[in-house]
């Protein structure tokens, strides 16, 4: 694992390749406490991404360069490698079980035995265009006795493990890795962003009792169900808050940019929060002709889409047989789409469980208030994950030659000149 040290503490960088944005945070981990202090960050829109998939490698690489360099400027340091957060419908996950016989006379389980049983659980048939991203242990069994979290040092003849496997499209993953290399950085490890965010947003008690993490991005939505202290289910849905923006643009006959501004500044996702029916300044689709729209009209466009989004979440949980697992701990919302006023109330009404917006625990993340926004939740999780990686997956793969630092700075100078 590569970390950059410059005039002081070692640094780690978390790079979140989102639905339509690239987000980077740079932090300094505390080896004694495990907490990470955020030193700088940036989040930039990217037209080279769609639902977490690269559709234009040059535009995506440019956005990566800009996000990391803006974060570097705030941190007053440079980084050469990043922990890469990925998402999107090309990711698929399921549960599996592995078993391993302890043939030795002492029957004491070693770390090598644990590695062996996890390896047996990941030995599954995959098509040539897919690869395993993570193998997350859910719990071990010793001689059929379930519920053992840490079996090393204990005795048994049969060691079994339940795991949550996350697989990715090799082509899409390679394109993301090439994008980062083109921008001038190495990837320490690609990480499923939902799992990273869950490490800092979902409390141990919520994981034990049962809860669901919902990451509402611009063009995709991630669902993660926790129970008995581990991830039990994860899913990517191809819907997000950008759908609300497009609905507003069509319904109000305005531009996407104006619709996004109206959504961010005035959007309401639950009727109980409507206070009056004041007009909102707007612009026609040409971007120049002034017009106005009432709050109630705007909300009438937003509410059906919000209801659809959380109804899809509820239906997916029901179809996965996970709905009953989340009642005690409720739901945790994150992602930029969760920032709209009333989103928590809407989710609570439709999902039928307590809902809160995710906030990183101060024992894990030390940061200014602006970095604690749901926009940065995955990047925060990547910083925390870098201190103690807990899931085995693919090895770091150099799929393209990265540009050296001097070339990156030279390219930035040319962009400023022209």
Image (tube, rainbow, N blue to C red):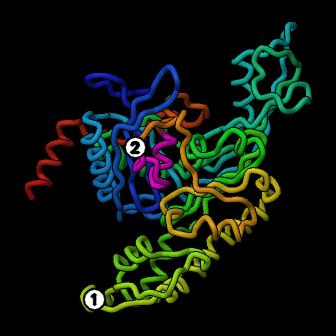
Q: Describe residue 76's horizontal placement relative to residue 49 as left or right.
A: left
Q: Describe residue 301's horizontal placement relative to residue 147 as left or right.
A: left
Q: Describe residue 10's horizontal placement relative to residue 343 as left or right.
A: left
Residue 306 placed where, x, y %? 59, 74
Query: Around disc 1, counting alpha carbons within 10 Å, would you say few (fewer than 14), some (14 to 19), or many (20 or more)?
Result: few
What residue sits right under mark 1 in the picture? 286
Q: Is residue 109 something that shows in the picture?
A: yes
Instruction: Report the quarter where the N terminus lies.
Output: top left
Nearest to the observer: residue 158 or residue 284: 284
Nearest to the observer: residue 347 or residue 93: 347
Question: Can residue 377 be found in the magenta stretch?
Answer: yes
Residue 73 placed where, x, y %? 24, 41
Residue that sits furthest to the right in the current view: 144
* Mark 2 or 1, closer to the camera: 2
Residue 335 placed where, x, y %? 51, 57
- Please tell me whether mark 1 sits on a helix, a strand or a loop: loop
The answer to which image quadrant residue 154 occupies is top right
- Please tell me whether mark 2 sits on a helix, a strand or a loop: loop
Tag shown at residue 87: none
Residue that sits furthest to the top in the current view: 106
Q: What distance separates the C-alpha of mark 2 from that of mark 1?
A: 39 Å
Q: Residue at x 75, y 66 (%)?
A: 352
Q: Is residue 129 something that shows in the picture?
A: no
Q: How many marks?
A: 2
Tag shown at residue 368: 2
Residue 49 placed where, x, y %? 41, 61
Query: Around disc 2, counting alpha carbons within 10 Å, would you say few (fewer than 14), some (14 to 19), or many (20 or more)?
Result: few
Q: Which residues are magenta?
A: 369-382
Q: Describe residue 377's horizontal placement relative to residue 328 as left or right.
A: left
Q: Residue at x 52, y 27 (%)?
A: 34
């Amino acid at each position: 694992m590569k970390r950059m040290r410059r005039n002081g503490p070692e640094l780690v960088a978390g790079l979140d390749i989102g639905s339509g944005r690239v987000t980077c945070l740079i932090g300094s981990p505390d080896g004694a406490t495990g907490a990470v202090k955020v030193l700088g960050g940036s989040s930039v829109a990217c037209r080279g991404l769609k639902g977490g998939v690269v559709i234009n490698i040059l535009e995506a690489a440019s956005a990566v360069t800009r996000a990391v360099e803006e974060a570097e400027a705030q941190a007053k340091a440079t980084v050469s490698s990043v922990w890469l957060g990925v998402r999107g419908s090309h990711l698929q996950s399921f549960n599996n079980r592995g078993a391993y016989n302890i043939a030795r006379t002492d029957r004491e389980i070693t770390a090598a035995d644990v590695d062996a049983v996890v390896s047996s659980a990941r030995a599954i048939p995959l098509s040539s265009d897919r690869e395993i991203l993570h193998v997350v242990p859910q719990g071990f069994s010793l001689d059929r006795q379930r519920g053992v979290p840490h079996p090393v040092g204990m005795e048994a003849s049969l060691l079994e493990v339940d795991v949550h496997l996350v697989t990715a499209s090799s082509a899409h993953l390679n394109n993301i890795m090439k994008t980062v290399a083109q921008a001038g950085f190495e990837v320490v490890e690609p990480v499923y962003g939902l799992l990273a965010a869950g490490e800092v947003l979902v409390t141990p008690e919520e994981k034990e009792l049962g809860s669901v993490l919902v990451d509402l991005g611009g063009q995709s939505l991630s669902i993660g169900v926790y129970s008995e202290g581990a991830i039990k289910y994860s899913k990517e849905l191809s819907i997000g808050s950008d759908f609300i923006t497009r609905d507003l643009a069509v319904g109000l006959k305005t531009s996407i940019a104006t619709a996004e501004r109206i959504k961010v500044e005035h959007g309401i996702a639950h009727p109980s929060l409507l206070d009056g029916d004041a007009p909102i300044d707007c612009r026609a689709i040409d971007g120049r002709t002034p017009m106005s729209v009432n709050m109630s009209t705007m909300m009438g466009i937003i509410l059906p889409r919000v209801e659809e989004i959380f109804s899809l979440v509820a239906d997916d949980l029901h179809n996965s047989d996970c709905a009953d697992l989340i009642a005690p701990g409720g739901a945790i919302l994150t992602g930029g789409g969760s920032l709209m006023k009333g989103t928590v109330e809407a989710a609570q009404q439709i999902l039928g469980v307590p809902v809160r917006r995710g906030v990183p625990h101060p024992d894990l993340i030390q940061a200014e208030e602006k970095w604690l926004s749901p926009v940065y939740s995955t990047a925060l999780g990547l910083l925390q994950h870098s201190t103690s990686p807990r899931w085995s997956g693919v090895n770091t793969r150099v799929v393209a030659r990265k540009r050296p630092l001097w070339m990156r700075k030279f390219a930035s100078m040319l962009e400023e000149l022209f």
